[in-house]
Image: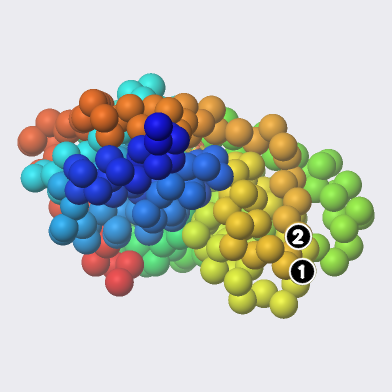
């Protein structure tokens, strides 16, 4: 009898499927994936899929929806329909329209962590790795930016434009958990360590960092850095990926409890089931998808 992992490999070949996984997936899922990356890398990868008929997307639903929008003729599957990003749910299309009415001379730059209906109202999308470049690429001087207030703060420090957070208090419950007290303690314990912080963390945590980076940015930075020890302020399985790729370096999660429960709904068992049954198919309303695709493609163009 085949093990679950062997069965997944067999099913991938039989169904001409690939598995894409976000950096926050557990180690076993990272290992069976054909590609592991941050949200921009996954978006670009999704835009380049040509040979596979099926994509099993191991990331929260907005990531899988983006892949579905970019590939209307392919089957995009997720292993669990409850894998939603709570921050994405903090901004709907109605809110974006309301803000646009309140601030008529602005452009709406939306984080990829949004509902498809909100994406459809955006001028352009961004991720944490390209937010500054995206905001600088558009002519408007006033920007509606959402839903993450901390990423909006990060961008506002880097650009010479007015950034209006939309909504005023959007946040990620995982990155809100990091706290300055813990970082002071870790710095005193590991003097030589470099502190890497995700821009979804609070401003005082970002200010304490040696570098503020997306998850993909952390991977590239660590590979180039002469440092040997790193304190990682983002979801705990980021450390799993960093350790896998840098066995000679030491990674300390700033908080072991920084777990995105939504990302963790995927298991080897439900990935196998997803390939076996063809469930669950990610579908996005055609009209919404067409509008959202314009904003997604603009972002990909700027990121090249
Ligand atoms: P990255 O784009 O850095 O992978 O971030 C995605 C995310 O959801 C962070 O919480
Ligand atoms: Fe959403 Fe936060 Fe989970 Fe990222 S870590 S998917 S922003 S809830």
Give how far across and how far down residue 247 sits, in percent.
Answer: 68, 63
Q: Please name whichever residue, 281 or 285, is drawn nearer the observer in this view of the structure.
A: 281
| In the displayed structure image, the side of residue 281 where residue 27 appears, left or right | right
Q: Residues within 10 Å of mark 2 (few under 14, many from 20)?
A: some
Give how far across and how far down residue 60 sits, in percent.
Answer: 39, 35
Q: Please name whichever residue, 41 or 92, is drawn nearer the observer in this view of the structure.
A: 41
Question: Which residue is label 1 attached to?
Answer: 228
| In the displayed structure image, the side of residue 70 where residue 105 appears, left or right | right
Q: Which comes before the other along the chain, label 1 or label 2?
A: 1
- Is residue 122 something one can see in this rendering? no
For the residues marked 1 and 2, what is the alpha-carbon distance in whole angstroms?
6 Å
**Residue drawn 16% across the image and 39% down it:** 75
Question: Which residue is label 2 attached to?
Answer: 250
Q: Residues within 10 Å of mark 1 (few under 14, many from 20)?
A: some
Outermost residue on the top side: it is 82
Outermost residue on the front side: it is 1
**Residue drawn 29% across the image and 58% down it:** 45
Which of the image's four quarters has the C terminus? bottom left
Q: Is residue 294 above or below residue 265?
A: below
| In the displayed structure image, the side of residue 75 where residue 260 appears, left or right | right
Which of the image's four quarters has the N terminus? top left
Q: Please name whichever residue, 100 or 289, is drawn nearer the observer in this view of the structure.
A: 289
Outermost residue on the right side: it is 188
- The kind of secondary structure element at disc 2 is strand
Quick check: marks 1 and 2 in contact, CB under 8 Å?
Answer: yes
Give how far across and how far down residue 173 sits, in percent.
Answer: 57, 31
Quarter of the view holding residue 286? top left
- Is residue 252 something one can see in this rendering? yes
**Residue drawn 73% across the image and 65% down it:** 249
């Amino acid at each position: 009898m085949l093990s679950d992992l062997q069965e997944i490999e067999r099913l991938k070949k039989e169904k001409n499927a690939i598995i894409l996984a976000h950096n926050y997936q557990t180690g076993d899922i990272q290992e069976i994936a054909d590609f592991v990356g941050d949200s921009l890398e996954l978006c670009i990868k999704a835009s380049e899929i040509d040979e596979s008929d099926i994509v099993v997307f191991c990331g929260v639903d907005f990531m899988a929806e983006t892949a579905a929008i970019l590939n209307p003729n392919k089957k995009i599957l997720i292993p669990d329909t409850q894998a939603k990003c709570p921050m994405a749910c903090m901004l709907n299309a109605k809110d974006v329209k309301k803000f646009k009415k309140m601030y008529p001379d602005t452009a709406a730059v939306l984080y990829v962590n949004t509902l498809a209906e909100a994406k459809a109202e955006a001028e352009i999308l961004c991720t944490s790795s390209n937010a500054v470049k995206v905001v600088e690429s558009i002519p408007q001087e006033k920007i509606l930016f959402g839903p993450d207030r901390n990423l909006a703060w990060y961008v506002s420090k880097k650009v010479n434009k007015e950034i209006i957070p939309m909504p005023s208090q959007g946040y990620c419950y995982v990155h809100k958990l990091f706290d300055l007290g813990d970082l002071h303690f870790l710095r005193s314990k590991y003097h030589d360590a470099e502190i890497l912080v995700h821009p979804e963390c609070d401003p005082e945590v970002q200010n304490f960092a040696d570098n503020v980076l997306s998850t993909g940015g952390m991977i590239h930075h660590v590979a180039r850095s002469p440092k040997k020890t790193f304190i990682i302020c983002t979801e705990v399985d980021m450390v799993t990926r960093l350790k896998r790729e840098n066995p000679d370096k030491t990674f300390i999660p700033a908080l072991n409890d920084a777990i995105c429960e939504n990302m963790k709904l995927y298991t080897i068992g439900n990935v196998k089931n997803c390939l076996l049954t063809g469930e669950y198919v990610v579908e996005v309303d055609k009209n919404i998808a067409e509008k959202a695709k314009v904003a997604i493609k603009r972002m990909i163009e700027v990121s090249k």
